Amino acid sequence: MGVEKYSSYDVLNAFFDEGSFNETDAYLKGDSGEAEAVTGYGTVEGVNVYAFAQNVDVCGGAMSRAQSKKITELYDLALKTGAPVIGFYNSVGGRLEQKYELLSAYGEILRKSSKLSGIVPQISVILGSCMGTSALIASAADFIIMEKDAKLSVDTIGDKASAQDNLEAGAVSFICEGYEACVDQAKALLAYLPANNLEPAPAFEPIPAYAEPDKLPKYFADEDSLLCVGGGYGEPVCTAFGRVNGYPVGIIVTKGGVISADGAKKMTKHVRFCDAFSIPLITIVDAEKFENLSDASKLISTYADATAVKISIISGTAVGAVYIALAGSTAGADLVYALDDAIVSPIAPKAAAFILDNSIADAPAAEQDQLAMEYVKANLTAVKAAEDGYIDDIVEPDTLRDKLTGAIEILLSKRVSTLPKKHTTKV
């Protein structure tokens, strides 16, 4: 089944609040006498937003110097006024007859998009074909939403260009069916994000949490507020947005065992975004080790550099480098909570028990595992870590919501002064 083609005006009118869309550079045309893209601004749920949509009905939406001028001028307005930018992509490529001007057009958009990064949120919505350099531009956004039959690849041949391929590679955040679902997903995501890096994310009326066994976020997040990002990549790590008593938050959940290389990359990306826009970050820690040194190092550096509100909850086992990276002093967490049955250990708990209690090795082999577990439950508990000052409080799941609400309210005014530097060298 091929991707349906939609009018750029259909897409933009569906995206913006009714009657709020205002077109910019409406009379700027390409060589064909018509524009290959429509640009403009309006409101989405009352919030100011800029958007552009490639006009596939005009020269296949091909990139040109005229299209580049319209999009870069929209970026300039977004930078001046501090409002998000949403791009709807559907194009056959570029106007090759423009040769070097085409290359310059692509480069100017990439430069402007990079300049906006971290200042206003950017979302790319891929409704059809987005190949070659256009894919680089779309991928410069913070989030990518793809229609399930769309194509996205820097390789113009199109290998590994499907929505599922890109989701599994970590390039895409959401897959939707049909342009209307893509538009709705973009609007839903915007509801969690601030307009820019100087404004707070919008707060909503609180909705009581609906707790479910074994799903800790649902004990504290407002009902129906969880929005998972990048499902299908880096699992079992989960990254999401949610609300706690109406306050937007970023959420990271590790689900036991090993944090894979992709899982660490996924976490790093989420931390960087939340930090750039000062969105409070809640990290639920349950893991024993990292799979990959390089990606673990980048995550530790990113987490430590982040100055947004950071709250960690040890829900299961936090061992060695995982504890240090996500809940220890290196992470710079503002508050660390733990469930009463959580385990904190410098190395694998069972190994620690054998090293710290020599009598276990002297016991009959059939009894050693049981003795090791008894040692762990008596000596490597979150309660012991709290007694030594490494955990702020021991909590029950049904008290988490109140704990986190109070913590977020007091920490939202957090200010951190950092030493001047251009950027970290860990990328």
Image (cartoon, grey):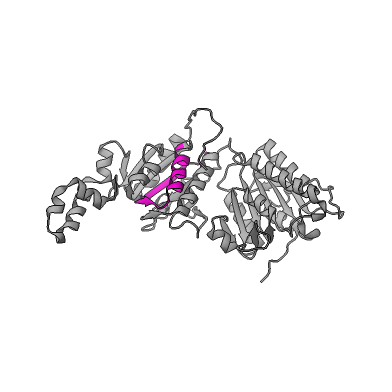
Q: Is residue 206 visible?
A: no
Q: Is residue 411 left or right of residue 355?
A: right
Foreground residue, 227 or 21? 227
Q: Position of residue 141 (x, y in %)?
A: 62, 48
Task: Identify the residue at image location x=19%, y=52%.
Answer: 374
Foreground residue, 17 or 5? 5
Q: Position of residue 27 (x, y in %)?
A: 84, 48
Task: Identify the residue at image location x=58%, y=48%.
Answer: 191
Q: Is residue 233 visible?
A: yes
Task: Identify the residue at image location x=86%, y=55%.
Answer: 32
Task: Identify the residue at image location x=24%, y=51%.
Answer: 351
Residue 34, magenta (yes or no): no
Residue farthest bottom in this picture: 1
Report the span colored magenta. 278-304
Number of numbered markers: 0
Q: Position of residue 340 (x, y in %)?
A: 28, 48
Q: Which of the image's four quarters has the N terminus?
A: bottom right
Q: Is residue 304 left or right of residue 188?
A: left
Q: Position of residue 352 (x, y in %)?
A: 24, 48
Q: Picture quarter containing residue 33? A: bottom right
Q: Is residue 28 left or right of residue 418?
A: right
Residue 295, magenta (yes or no): yes
